[in-house]
Image (cartoon, grey):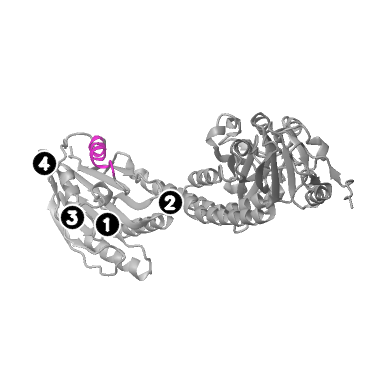
């Protein structure tokens, strides 16, 4: 009995017949599969896509026919080189295709694992490429999230070692701005509220630091307004929200919106010129005090700020604020210490004559201005006509050292006016400081000049010996018995009395001669080898000493020069 031929389609000459039932079966599998399937001709133009591919890309199948991948899906990376290799040698290839389609997706980046095969007809002619793509966005998204979480942790960990490495406010702001670029933003600024208006409400702020990606320096240069007052206008800045600890995020800011702000907010023109489309502001607050804000901007092709970016920026700002608060407090204390020290040393620094003694002095802070110490000098004209010269150095730095210096200075002045000898002054001062529980010890040197009997009486509490510049020009150290520092409670001191022989007496603190890693004797040798003229003005002598010896000093220097004035 003849078979029914209605299910058969005529085949090409020489080719076996094809069962139409199998073709329909295969078509049903392809069109019902949950994978993308496409056929492209040798020019890499679509001739077929299955329904699943149409659904996952957001385009009907008809929109593909006769077009290339780039024409229908411009945001997908084109694997043209892979497809042409398949056409050329016939070897199947597997590749990862990623990008964005016309369908909204919960994934940051969509990815497909695709396999391509060459297609030939019955005569062996190459007619195109068939591709099958399985979306792997979900597992890849999980991996991306793990990687982002790792990067966030690494970023926050490194912030501790890269932000707040110094003690100055400007340096801390600069480190913060440079740290977030380009990891979080194309450009970043740090705004600070003046310390006396740190409530954050209606307070003027200044841009203290700015950073931008190297390739965008020119385009974003107009945003750099360091030192200038900044004020976000109502409706976009929400300064009160920042002061309350909230993060401000604005994405997709249009050119029209920037133009609307230009009359009320001058930086808007810079944002418009730079193509800024997204901003994120995170508060800098520590112990309930609003210090300012971290300003982030993205421009051009950069992605808008995400919730994750806001979280990272908030944490970075919180960590930086603690370092910034420390720097603010340190600078405030540093300023107080410097003002106190300068106020106490200002008067003796001028050339003066006390009875029969002419004096001048200098104070030079360390090269590192954060190390405000307790070096001091004093010249005291006593009621009985004698003159007391004092040089001292309180251990440590900062406000505490400056306050301690003031305390020692006042104590020594009171004891000197009581008519005590230098060694008795040191004994009483040591006992008084020790009994008071004052923890800052100090070295000190006293020289008491008595013009009536032409003598000098010396006593030392752990201090370096003075230098005597003889009338004939020689320089030598004055040997003086050295007792313990003041405040140790060990107070037994000796004194030495010498005739006043003319010349110049130089008293100094250890910053003049002491250098790290070097024996103190080398520094003293440099001092005594100087060529100085005892007949020069005292101002010239002390300036010459500092010019030769102060370079490279890591500590404060106090220098006091005295010379007896001949009576007429």
**Residue that carries the numbered disc 1 in the rendered image:** 444
Q: Which mark is residue 337?
A: 2
The reply to whether the C-beta atoms of the residues labelled 4 and 3 are less than 8 Å apart is no
First in sequence: mark 4 vs mark 3 = 3
The residue tagged 4 is 474
Q: Residue under circle 3?
A: 457
Q: Position of residue 361 (x, y in %)?
A: 29, 43
Element carrying mark 1: strand
* Closest to the observer, 247 or 325: 247
Distance, label 4 to label 3, CA atoms, is 21 Å
- Closer to the N terminus: mark 4 or mark 2? 2
Marks 2 and 3, the one that precedes in the sequence: 2
Q: Secondary structure at mark 2?
A: helix
Quadrant housing the C terminus: top left
User: Which secondary structure type mostly characterizes the magenta part of the structure?
Assistant: helix
Disc 1 + disc 4, Cβ < 8 Å: no
Q: Nearer the viewer, mark 4 or mark 3?
A: 4
Q: Residue 559 location in percent, x, y?
A: 27, 45
User: Residue visible at 41% across and 54% down?
Assistant: 398
Query: What stretch of residues is rendered in magenta?
Result: 540-552
Q: Is residue 316 visible?
A: yes
Give the mark nearest the N terminus, 1 or 2. Answer: 2
Query: For the residues carrying marks 2 and 3, which lies nearer the camera in this image?
Result: 2
């Amino acid at each position: 009995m003849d078979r029914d031929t209605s299910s058969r389609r005529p085949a090409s000459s020489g080719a076996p017949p094809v069962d139409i039932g199998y073709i329909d079966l295969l078509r049903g599998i392809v069109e019902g599969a949950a994978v993308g399937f496409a056929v492209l001709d040798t020019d890499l133009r679509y001739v077929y896509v299955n329904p699943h591919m149409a659904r996952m890309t957001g385009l009907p199948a008809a929109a593909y026919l006769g077009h290339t991948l780039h024409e229908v899906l411009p945001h997908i990376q084109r694997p043209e080189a892979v497809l042409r290799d398949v056409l050329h040698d016939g070897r199947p290839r597997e590749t990862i295709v990623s990008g964005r389609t016309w369908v909204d997706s919960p994934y940051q980046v969509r990815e497909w694992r695709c396999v391509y095969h060459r297609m030939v007809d019955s005569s062996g002619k190459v007619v195109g490429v068939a591709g099958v793509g399985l979306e792997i966005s979900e597992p890849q998204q999980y991996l991306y999230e793990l990687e982002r979480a790792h990067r966030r942790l690494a970023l926050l960990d490194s912030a501790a070692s890269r932000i707040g490495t110094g003690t100055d406010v400007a340096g801390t702001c600069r480190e913060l701005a440079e740290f977030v670029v380009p990891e979080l933003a194309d450009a970043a600024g740090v705004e600070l509220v003046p310390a006396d208006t740190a409530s954050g409400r209606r307070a003027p702020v200044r841009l203290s630091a700015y950073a931008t990606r190297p390739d965008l320096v020119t385009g974003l240069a107009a945003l750099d307004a360091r030192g200038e007052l900044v004020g976000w206008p109502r409706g976009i800045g929400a300064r009160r929200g920042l002061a309350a600890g909230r993060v401000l995020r604005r994405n997709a800011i249009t050119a029209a919106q920037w133009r609307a702000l230009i009359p009320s907010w001058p930086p808007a023109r810079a944002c418009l010129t730079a193509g800024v489309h997204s901003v994120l502001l995170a508060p800098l607050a520590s112990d309930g005090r609003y210090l300012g804000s971290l300003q982030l901007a993205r421009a051009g092709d950069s992605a808008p700020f995400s919730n994750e970016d806001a979280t990272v920026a908030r944490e970075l700002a919180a960590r930086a604020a603690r370092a910034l608060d420390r720097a603010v407090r340190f600078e405030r204390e540093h300023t107080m210490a410097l003002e106190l020290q300068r106020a106490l040393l200002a008067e003796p620094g001028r050339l003066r004559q006390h009875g029969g003694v002419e004096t001048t002095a200098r104070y030079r802070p360390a090269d590192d201005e954060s190390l405000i110490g307790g070096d001091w000098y004093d010249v005291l004209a006593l009621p009985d006509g004698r003159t007391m010269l004092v040089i001292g150095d309180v251990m440590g730095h900062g406000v505490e050292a400056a306050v301690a210096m003031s305390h020692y200075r006042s104590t020594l002045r009171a004891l000197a006016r009581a008519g005590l000898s230098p060694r008795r002054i040191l004994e009483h001062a040591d006992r008084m400081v020790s009994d008071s529980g004052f923890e800052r010890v100090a070295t000190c040197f006293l020289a008491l000049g008595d013009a009536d009997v032409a003598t000098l009486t010396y006593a030392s509490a752990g201090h370096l010996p003075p230098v005597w510049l003889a009338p004939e020009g020689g320089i030598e150290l004055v040997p003086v018995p050295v007792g313990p520092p003041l405040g140790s409670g060990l107070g037994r001191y000796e004194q030495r009395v010498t005739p006043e022989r003319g010349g110049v007496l130089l008293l100094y603190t250890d910053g003049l001669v002491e250098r790290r890693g070097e024996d103190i004797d080398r520094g003293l040798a440099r001092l005594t080898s100087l060529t100085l003229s005892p007949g020069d003005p005292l101002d010239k002598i002390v300036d010459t000493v500092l010019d030769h010896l102060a370079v490279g000093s890591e500590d404060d220097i106090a220098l006091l020069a005295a010379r007896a004035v001949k009576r007429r």
